[in-house]
Amino acid sequence: MKAKGQSLKPGILEGIRVLDLSRMLSGPYATMLLADHGAEVIKIESAEGDSSRRSGPFKDNDIKRDWSGYFISLNRNKKSISLDLKNAEDLVFLKKLIEISDVLVENFRPGVMKRLGLSFDEVSKVNPRIVYGSISGFGSEIFGESPYKNWPSYDVVAQAMGGLISLTGYDEKTPLKVGPGIADIFSGSLLSFGLLASILKSRDTGRAQFVEVAMYDAIISMCERAIYQYDFNKLIPKPEGNGHPLLAPFGIYNAKDGFIAIGIVEDSYWNVLKKIIGFDDLLNDLKYGTIALRAKNRNELNKQINLWTKEFRKKELVNLLGGKVPFGPVNNVREIFEDKHIRERNMILEIEQPFGEAKKWKVAGNPVKFQDFHSSNLTPPTLGEHKELYANNLHSIKSNKPSYPFQPEKKDYQCKLTFMSHENRLFEFYASSFTWLRSKETFLICSLEKSKFMSIENSVRAVKFHFLKLTTRKDAYKKAIARLNIKLSEKSISEVSLTYTQFDILITVKT
């Protein structure tokens, strides 16, 4: 995905290495989001491979049935290693990969990873800064022990238990599952957020982090409206069909050749819509004058809206309503393929097939965009394709552990501040304390007694920071300290920030 007229940098997540032990949809979706944007995702598969490889559908020219659409869509831009995790030699190899990786992702039932010797506790011993991401139906006991923790769960189970199905459909007698695997996809999306947040914290602290998403929890979060509705009015929300319990007109309406969506929330949009429609009873009827009144009379109002919309084709309604009120046609997938928006925003990726001169595969693109950064659409891996690559180069692959300049600590060093006046007089003080602040840049913050500084503050033009070892023992960081002292020598007073507290002055300088 390349923005027009731009020369893009590599993916924004370049330098993050992910071991993906997940399969099917939820975990692979989370790691796909990362791989698309440059993370090195190594898919760890059994000898049979991810079961999605066999799930179909298949293209007619794929005679061996090796390339399932299910697998291709979720595993582009990844590498594959086939391992038997019950085999001691393969387990040792995996642990060597763990040592040089940032993230491990799994979506097995709780207990499986522990039986394999790959629980968070065991993995964090191998790599003390690993981010360990887990998706399961009901989570682990770490965040609260679920009575269902050992139940297997797939998308339909999470949709059911999380309340989504109870809110979907036309009435209580005909419950309806949401079409796409939304429990898996939403859980995967949440996990990708959790992984990136944990990477930031792990790189800051050097400590491992466990991040978990339970699919049941994810759907509860998605159905947030039902939670507060029940709390506020003690009513159990029921299916509303294509409508909305609190808003109108809001939902799906007939056109001559299909359906369209209208979502009126604000009065300003309602005033525009009723003028476009032009029905006298809509223009003048007070029972539709506020959001609350429209919601109360939504059944009658929706019927009137539908009487108007069904007189037009979808393209005609696009011309009448598009850009004026919240509106959109109900698209089928063919119409999505033909939509200019989809082409312009690269929301259908074309992926090279690994055989012949066949047309490219087409899969859904990544909705997350980063200005100035490239994202990828590389062919997904064959089963075990990259085992030899990693096996032969394991010792030369660099750890992704970030290297920061040495930062002395208070228990080992003291910091002397030398202030220079406009007359080149020198005033030396020792900081009562110092600390380091690391965000996009690194800052040294020194505390100095206010009384010591206030007598000279008006005459100071520059300051020099100098670190000294507290003990006489050999300093293993002598060269690093020397470089730091040179870097912090003679800073203009305009280059530092002075913050006055009740007793101290905080002197902050960028390093």
Image: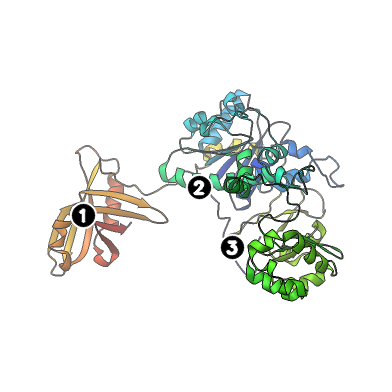
> Looking at the figure, which quarter contains the N terminus?
bottom right
Evaluate if marks 2 and 3 touch, with contact meaning CB atoms under 8 Å apart: no
Q: Which mark is residue 197?
A: 2
Residue 278 pos. (x, y %):
76, 76
Q: Secondary structure at mark 2?
A: helix
Q: Earlier in the sequence, mark 3 or mark 1?
A: 3
Mark 3 crowd level (few <14, some 14–19, many ≥20, 10 Å Cα): some
Q: Earlier in the sequence, mark 2 or mark 3?
A: 3
Q: Nearer the viewer, mark 2 or mark 3?
A: 2
Please state which amino acid type lies under the numbered disc 3.
Answer: Leu
At a point 72% along the width and 76% down the height, the residue shown is: 275
Q: Cα distance, mark 3 to mark 1?
A: 47 Å
Image quadrant in which you'd find residue 421: bottom left
Evaluate if marks 3 and 1 touch, with contact meaning CB atoms under 8 Å apart: no
Q: Nearer the viewer, residue 120 or 84?
A: 120
Q: Is residue 312 left or right of residue 5?
A: right
Residue 286 pos. (x, y %):
68, 70
- Label 1 sits on residue: 504
Q: Which mark is residue 8?
A: 3
Residue 386 pos. (x, y %):
65, 40
Asked if residue 16 can be seen in this view, the reply is no
Please state which amino acid type lies under the numbered disc 2.
Answer: Ala
Q: Cα distance, mark 2 to mark 1?
A: 34 Å
Mark 2 crowd level (few <14, some 14–19, many ≥20, 10 Å Cα): some
Q: Secondary structure at mark 3?
A: loop
Evaluate if marks 2 and 1 touch, with contact meaning CB atoms under 8 Å apart: no
Asked if residue 459 can be seen in this view, the reply is yes
Q: Is residue 448 left or right of residue 12?
A: left
